[in-house]
Image: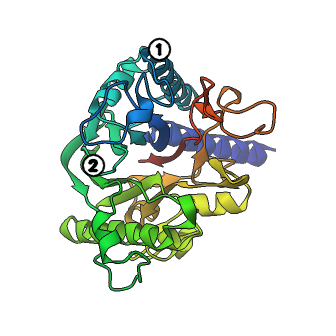
Amino acid sequence: MKRYLYVLASLSVVLTLSVTACAKGKNYVIGFYNLENLFDTYHDEGKNDYEYLPDGANNWTEEKYRKKLHNMAKVIAAMQKDNKQWHTVLGVSEVENRHVLEDLVAEPAIAGANFQIVHYDGPDRRGVDVALLYDPARMKVVESESIPFDFNSTRIRFTLDQEQQDYFRTRDVLMVHGIIDGEHFAFYVCHLPSRLGGKGQDLRARGGEIIYEHSMKMMQKYPGIKCVVMGDMNDNPTDDSMAVYLRGREHIGDVTPADYFSPFLSMLKAGYSSLYYRGEGNIYDCILVNYNLAHAAPGTFQIVPITKGIYYGRVFSKPFMTNQSGPYKGTPFRTFSNGAFINGYSDHYPTYIVIRK
């Protein structure tokens, strides 16, 4: 009996120490959110933003703009409530300029996060860019770069002829090199070319290739650096841009130093969706991590399971972000429907991962 009680006591101590160790671990939330056309009400010279002007097709007034900002902030605040902390890093897409980002981070619901901004004006003809919001108390930015799209590939055969290539414009990829708790990270935020018209598979493949090549150079320059790729890929994690050109692997055990771990690949197969395209659920809002974050050295940051204790990612959705009735029931509650402003949120759900030290 005494031996039995001793074993129980020993197990109790072990469990207590394990819980204490987990409690002492530092969790950091890394996410991405497509804000679905966050435009202000002013024309940006040289950009085709006319539909988002007060006299444009969307009658985009200051009142609608303010509602949009409020709604985007509400979603970000809801994630903070669930995670008991603000994002350390939040990549965003479909933002018109720095002005809308400054208005967003000043929204009362998220002003307390003190998000700082990394943004470059890009070449997209509509004027939508990607950007990074970050917590300056947790990450120090070392450098950043806006990486342009190009056609300099030896592996991809493009469908656009030379004249079309010269005319083509898309979003740059944003790279932000930062230090979190003494560790080097490179964050890549992207919005790969659209699927409109059934085109762009080769263009998205090139986008994945550009990110991969740049990140490999960063890993050579900064041995041990932890890379995170995030964005609206306009592709699923099973598509070539992610699985072939970014070398995204479904299972963390299969990841080598030349690969990325693609946590949303298994979630897609399990039926999770971050948006619906032509009536089908997809996860275009992907986040991938390199070997150094998937197989981290003891005592350093590594990606950890967060959904059902199995999946290493989360598609964040709440009832208020989702259509509750009608033909689009169960899909993201977006800003416009059939050309009418319906005061929704986005046609994408945000996604995120958690890293722990």
Indicate the amino acid at tag 1.
Answer: Glu
Is residue 14 or residue 28 the one in the foreground? 28
Q: Is residue 114 left or right of residue 8?
A: left
Rendered position, 36 above or below 173: above
Residue 179 pos. (x, y %): 25, 47
The residue indicated by pointer 2 is: 122
- Observer able to see residue 91: no
Q: CA distance from mark 1 to mark 2?
A: 27 Å
In which image quadrant can residue 137 be found?
A: top left
Q: Residue at x 50, y 29 (%)?
A: 76
Between 297 and 21, the one lying in front of the other is: 297
Left or right? Give the position of 239 relative to 273: left
- Disc 1 target residue: 63
Q: What element does badge 1 sit on?
A: helix
Task: State the image coordinates of residue 83 (x, y, percent, origin top left).
Answer: 54, 32
Count neighbours of disc 1 (C-alpha within 10 A) and say few if under 14, some if 14 to 19, many if 20 or more: few
Asked which secondary structure carries label 2, the reply is loop
